[in-house]
Image (cartoon, helix red, strand yellow):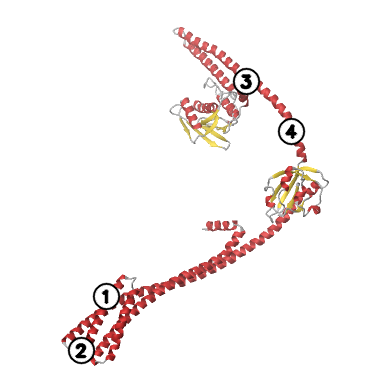
Amino acid sequence: MKSVWQQLKNYWYRLPIEYRGSVVIAIPLVCLMGSVVTYTLLRQRMVEAQSYVEYTNQVLAKSQSTLISLLNAETGVRGYYISKKPLFLEPYQSASKKIGSDLKELEDLVRDRPDQERQVRLLNQLAGARLAHLQSLVRQVDESNGATTPADIDRMLAGKQVMDRFRSEIGKFEAEEQRVLKIRAEILKDQQDFNATAMWYGIALSLFGTILTIRLLQDLTKELRDREISLRESRSLIEAIVSNIVDGAIVVNPQGQIETFNPAAEQMFGYTAAEVIGWEWQRLLSEEDEATRKLLFYLPCALSELTPTGQIVQAVGRRKNGEVFPLEVSMNNIELDDDRIAIFRDISARTQAASALAAKAVEMAELNNSLIASNLSLSHSNRELDQFAYITSHDLKAPLRAVASLSEWIEEDLDEHISPETRAQMHLLRSRIYRMQALLNSLLEYSRVGRVNTPVITVDVQRLVTKVIDALAPPDTFTIKITTSLPTLQARQQPLEQVFSHLIDNAIRHHPTKVGIIEISATDLGDRYEFAIADDGDGIEPQYQTRIYTIFQTLKARDLQENIGAGLAIVKKIVTAEGGTIELQSLAGKGAIFRFTWPKQPVIDKDNTIAQAQ
């Protein structure tokens, strides 16, 4: 929770001050609008709940009015029946006119509730039947001579039953309305309680918003005061820097007028600060130079349209005595009143040096042509050296092969007469011949490194390493693992394949046992890849680690372990020729890790390029 609060504070203080000011102003407005909207909505719901209660009371009042009217009609008819006086018929006559309209209004009031609407229709029927009985009784009184007949008594009993049922049905109707009234009264009370609670919350929220607004306004006021102090200090610091900077420096206001002119600028242009304060800064430049005119085309009042911030533009300045000189102009924004600092640097000495360099470039071009001719001659010499090395190797290896064959023939011819010691000497003779052939092959391979034109292609190193491992055919007891994804890059495939072949073969042959682990990995270093071949062999002691890259140098006698000692020398020469590096990390008894780098962009082989052009 604390971290989230800290993040919110950091985000708040990163906002521009005008955004924060807008938020502070918006807080009380939002609180006020929220209170008005809430009050309006709550009042509307309150009015709706109140109207529902009043509506139900109106239904009950209309129901009671209907019942009272019918009872008054019944009482009036009874009085007329007893006294025969028409005065008692007034309630009956009034009820006869009113009950129908009252029940119709009652039906309209409950039209949204079908059950109650059906109940009103039933009441309407019962009321009509009762009025019909009363009318019949009145007519009987008018027509009779005052004697009560059995038919009159039956008619009265039937009317009483209708009236009893009417009372029962209207009681049911009013009970349902009372139930609805209770529910709606509870809703009204809940709404009143909710409105009161909401209003208190609204008051609390408004108070919180007011307090928050005051606090934020205090923070903004303090920050603005601190900024004002900081701006004054910054202006003083800028004026101090401008006064002591070694290049010519001026401060330009948004209208393009000079406000500050440092001593270096006075010395450069020959004007005093008092002379140029208030000038448009372009007056320090010469209008005759085309590059300078591009600067002068900008309107002085639109400083934002001047040279892009920080971009250096070459122009020509004009001193007070009329002398023109080359200079560089750089405009930089200042976080202070939208001013800019213009930095002027006199490049007269550099221009003179550039002229001298141009003359030197011509001389270098002539020298380069001479070097090209020398490279062509060197290319011829390299081809002749390749041819000499091939012929020498072939001519030397042919007699060696012949001596090896002769030793085998002599051993076969003297098979029964040759002694075991002589046979051993013959095997030793052939092993020396084979060693000599290997030395010649290694020497020829070493001499060709970096001088053979190999095309650059897309190399899948993962597939290349798998191919090398298959070609070396390590013992089944050896485990060779590729621990990371090996890349695909543009490279010369043959040299890269030679490096992996020599290093992996070296790790297999020099392992003290037939059970070993070799791990191959790659790391992306940006402009190159670093490949690593690690083994768990005996390792190499530090004092011998510089000797391993010398051709024909071995750490063990060749009679103890057959080894030419050229593999690592060839590897280092290949890696170096391709623009990479190789290093060894090893301790005695803890294995060895050979790391070599291979550039992503192949080194251009100038000698081979010249040779191809030839």
C-beta proximity under 8 Å, tags 1 and 4: no
Task: Give above or below for 591 relative to 133.
Answer: above
Element class at badge 4: helix
Q: Which mark is residue 382?
A: 3
For label 2, count other residues whose C-alpha is less than 10 Å away and answer few (under 14), some (14-19) or many (20+). Answer: few
Secondary structure, mark 3, is helix
- Between 459 and 540, the one lying in front of the other is 459
Which residue, given by chain and number where applicable, does mark 1 sit on?
Answer: 122
For the residues marked 4 and 3, what is the alpha-carbon distance in whole angstroms?
35 Å
Between circles 4 and 2, the one closer to the viewer is 2
Mark toward the viewer: 3 or 2: 2
Q: Earlier in the sequence, mark 3 or mark 1?
A: 1
Q: Residue at x 68, y 50 (%)?
A: 305
How far apart are the alpha carbons under marks 1 and 2? 32 Å
Q: Tell me which label, 3 or 2, sits earlier in the chain.
A: 2
Crowd around label 1: few <14 · some 14–19 · many ≥20 (10 Å): some
Identify the element where label 1 is drawn. Answer: helix
Q: Quadrant of residue 226?
A: bottom right
Of badges 1 and 2, the one in the foreground is 2
* Position of residue 288 measured from the top left corner of the image (x, y, whole percent): 77, 43
- Mark 1 vs 2, N-terminal side: 1
Residue picked out by circle 2? 143
**Tag 2: residue type?**
Glu
Residue at (31%, 70%) from the top-left corner? Answer: 114
